[in-house]
Amino acid sequence: MTVLDRRSLNRATLARQLLLDRADLPVLDAVAHLCGLQAQEPQEPFIGLWSRLRAFDPAALSELLTGRRVVRTHLMRRTVHLLTADDTLAWRSRHEAMLRQRVVGTYRGELEGLDFDAIGAAGLAVMADGEPRTMSELVRLLTEHRPPTTGRPAPHAPGRRALGELLIPALLPVAQIPPRGLWRTKAGVRNVLLSSWLGRKPDPLPLDGSDPVGQVLVRRYLAAFGPAASADLRAWSGIAGLPAAVAAVRDELVTFRDERGRELFDLPDAPRPDPETPAPVRFLPAFDNAILGYQDRSRIVDDEHRGLSVAGERAVLVDGRAAATWTVDTATVVVTPLRPLTRAERAAVTEEGRAMAAFLSEGESDRVRIAP
């Protein structure tokens, strides 16, 4: 079985993530290809798309949000993602068990003994009028008018935070509606049911126990992130129950090994560039899935810096690897190297940083500072 070294995996990831060459895709197609963008920080998807698309216009993404063709919702790993409306409706039910398990794992003591089905039904009744609500407003209305029902006596009533996170997103399929997430806009989270916002309920799971959505997730993930191991697929989605879906499509896939000996799966015709292909400097947003989309992140991040994206650090890729972090201070892009940069690398980082500064300031500044 062919062994793909770290550099080969790096170039494949950059190609799939549209980071090797900026793409000419429409914004909606890019969001779909990437299987969504992590978006708990509302402005970060704009940075991610600017680094991936030629002539990216942030107004195009804002228009997709207000036009309800792109949705902010909790999905993979119980984190907020920006997804196409079609993918949101197709994938939500397949993630529901994971969403519930993760909130229960966080608040197990407070949620023990509660009747989740009854609470979910009560929450649906409150939200059925289509009025946007914050999590705290939903919890207040629910506890005032429809107290949580228990299947057996609970040791104590759940805290408002625990109950809110059980409802959103574990029990209620909701969208975070604009102006949250629009370009250069600050706004709090207001939720409406997906069925109200998109005009129909999420697709139900098949009754026969088959897993067509799981098989779609395998193919779509590999198109955007492959070659990858089953553990990487699980780390990206948060779903543990995908081995059967991998087995179902295995005959469609090609297999490799990485340098650790892990079996990697891939689509046969997906790009796997020559490992010596030059990789341009790219500025990544916080929590970018090019890093978080894997269990083994060594294809992009050195082990000693593994936690940088989890901590919300924005990474700068130099020769395809995380070589610096970056922030913005008074319209200046400030780059902090993680290793010494050559003169040529500093020049390339400065050039891309100037373009990033101009994008974020809408042309008012192109200042870059590289810290010692």
Image (cartoon, rainbow, N blue to C red):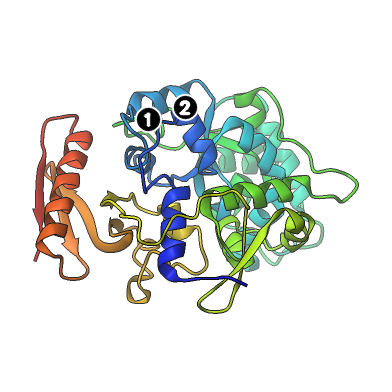
Residue on which disc 1 sits: 182
Q: Is residue 190 visible?
A: no
| The quadrant where residue 196 appears | top right
The secondary element bearing badge 2 is classed as helix
Say whether marks 2 and 1 touch (CB < 8 Å): yes
Which residue is more in the foreground, 370 or 299?
299
Count neighbours of disc 2 (C-alpha within 10 A) and say few if under 14, some if 14 to 19, many if 20 or more: many
Q: Is residue 200 left or right of residue 282?
A: right
Q: Is residue 9 above or below residue 350?
A: below
Q: Is residue 20 visible?
A: yes
- Work out how far the residue at label 2 is from the one at label 1, CA to CA, in angstroms: 7 Å
Q: Position of residue 272 (x, y in %)?
A: 49, 55
Locate the C terminus and report the quarter of the image it occupies: bottom left
Give the numbered dot on residue 65. Answer: 2
Count neighbours of disc 1 (C-alpha within 10 A) and say few if under 14, some if 14 to 19, many if 20 or more: many
The type of residue carrying mark 2 is: Leu
